[in-house]
Each structure stands twice: as structure tokens, then as C-alpha cells.
Amino acid sequence: MRSKWMVTAVSLFIAPALVVASAPANAATPGIRSTKEYQALKVYVSELNAKKTQQQTPAEISKYRSELSKKRAKASTKVRVLYQKQLNQAKDRRNNRKAKVVALKQRRNAQIAQLKNARQQKLNSIAANRRAAIARINTNYANQQDKLNKQLKKARKKLAKATNPVVKQNLREEISAIQDELNTLAQEKRSDLNIANNKYDNQVENAKEQYAQKIENTTEQFNSQITNLQTRLRELYQQSKQNAQQRRADEFAIVKAKYDEGVGYINQMPVNGQ
């Protein structure tokens, strides 16, 4: 259930990044045709078109060519400016998406830290239960041992004072029986302590294994999402860059076509004296 929740939470976090990433790369950047530089070139070519049948002096022809080249240069420079703007926008989008990757890594680290803290709390709880269980065992056997030790001390005092051989023999047998009981209690205590320690050792190992698996699953889920997101962002940036380069080439071609149109009109102009 936890793993299912984890995948859902991570997916909800990543979805907005991909939605933003899918926005058209060219939407915020105007085309060359809408710029004043291209419009100036276009208007000038129209003026040349109007003059293509009029007599011109060589100086005027030279002036037209120079002015046409200047306007082409300005329009071409604008193409480069628009390309750089589009590229910068792509870089800004990439940086914004990288911030989402960083945030996702922070969430991963926070959840892993929570799991490690929960693991430590679980281990602390097991340790407290172990101490309580061992204390109960020690207290239980201490009471029984104290009682037997008192009986043993009393029997030894009686033996020290006894003179009757039969009484002495009976006391020796009683002392031996008490010592046997003490030895048995010591063995039972060790056995109970071993059982308790084994029980809590198993709980410790199980807790470590469970939380190690949870930490591994959480790490793998987040790392997979992070890797997929990083790959997608690289692809989106490269696609945006390629789109910008293609658009730059297309707009250079638009400017050149308009320039060539103007050159054609100049070439059609009749020159005085020719």
C-alpha cells in the first residue's frame, strides 16, 4: 500500500513539469516577418519594384544596392537576435524544470530520512522491550534465588551447631538439595535470558530488513522518476534547440529571398547611357 502511494505521489509531482515542458517552444518568440527590420526590407523592395522600369544613373543603382544590403544586414541581425532569444527561453525553461528535479531529490531525501528515523524508533522500542523483559526475568529469578540462599544460610548455621550424626546428615542432604535448586535456577535463568535475547535479536533483524527494503524501494522509485524526468528534459531542450536552429535557417532564407527579389528589380532597371 505504501509503495502504491509513493508512486502516485511522485507521479503527481512530475506531471506538472511535463505539462509545462510540452508547451510550444516558439510561442513566445515573434517571427521575422513581424519585425520592423524585415518590414523595412520589404517596403524598400516594393519601392525598387516601383522603380524597375525607370531610368537610373549608375550612382543611383549603386545607392540602391548599398541600401538593400544594409536592410538585409539589419534583418539578418534580427534573425540572430530572435534565435538567441528563443534559445535563452529554452534554457530558462530547462532551468525551471531542473528546479523540479532538485525538489524531487529533496522529497526523496526527506522520505528516506523519515524512514530511517522510523527505523531507529522501532529499534529503540525493541531495545526498551528487551530491557524490560530481561529485568522481569532477573527480578523473578532473584526473588527465588534470595529465598533459596536464605534457606541455604540457615541450613549451614544449623549444620555448624549440630552434634547428632543423623541430624548432620539430614542437613547435608538439605544443603545439597538447595544447591541443586540454585544450580537449576541459574540454568533456567540463562535459558530464559537466551530465549528473550534471541526473540529480540530476531525482531531487530526483521525490523532492519523491513526498513532496508522500504528505503531501497523508495530510493529506486524516486531515482527512476528522476532519471526519466532528466532524460525527458534533455530531449525537450534538444528539440527546442533544433527547432530554434531550423527556424533561424528558415528566416535567413526568407530574408535572402526578399533580398534576391530586390536585386532582381535593380537588375531590371534601365541605366542612363546604356
Image (cartoon, rainbow, N blue to C red):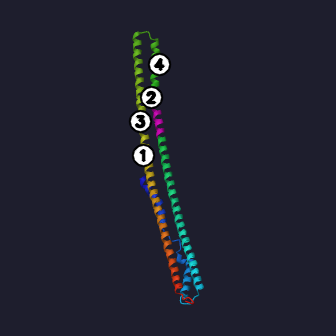
**Label 1 neighbour load within 10 Å: few <14, some 14-19, many 20+:** few
Residue position marked by numbered label 3 in the rendering: 198
Q: Tell me the element at label 1.
A: helix
- Which quarter of the rendering shows the C terminus? bottom right
Give how far apart the Cα atoms at labels 3 and 1 are: 18 Å
Of the two numbered discs 1 and 4 in the rendering, the one whose residue sits closer to the viewer? 1
Residue position marked by numbered label 2 in the rendering: 141
Q: Earlier in the sequence, mark 1 or mark 4?
A: 4
Of the two numbered discs 1 and 2 in the rendering, the one whose residue sits closer to the viewer? 1
**Picture residue at 41% right of the left edge, 32% below the top:** 192
Of the two numbered discs 3 and 1 in the rendering, the one whose residue sits closer to the viewer? 1
Residue position marked by numbered label 4 in the rendering: 153
Q: Do we see residue 9 in this rendering?
A: no
**Label 4 neighbour load within 10 Å: few <14, some 14-19, many 20+:** few
Label 1 amino acid? Answer: Gln
Label 2 amino acid? Answer: Tyr
**Which range is magenta?**
126-142
Label 4 amino acid? Answer: Lys
Q: Tell me the element at label 2.
A: helix
Q: Earlier in the sequence, mark 2 or mark 4?
A: 2
Q: Nearer the viewer, residue 207 or 135?
A: 207
**Picture residue at 45% right of the left edge, 17% below the top:** 155
Would residue 274 appear left or right of 206 to someone viewing this image?
right
Q: Tell me the element at label 3.
A: helix
Give how far apart the Cα atoms at labels 3 and 2 are: 19 Å
* Whether residue 215 is situated above or below residue 80 in the rendered picture: above
Residue position marked by numbered label 1 in the rendering: 210
Give how far apart the Cα atoms at labels 3 and 4 are: 35 Å
Label 3 amino acid? Answer: Asn
Q: Nearer the viewer, residue 69 or 188?
A: 69
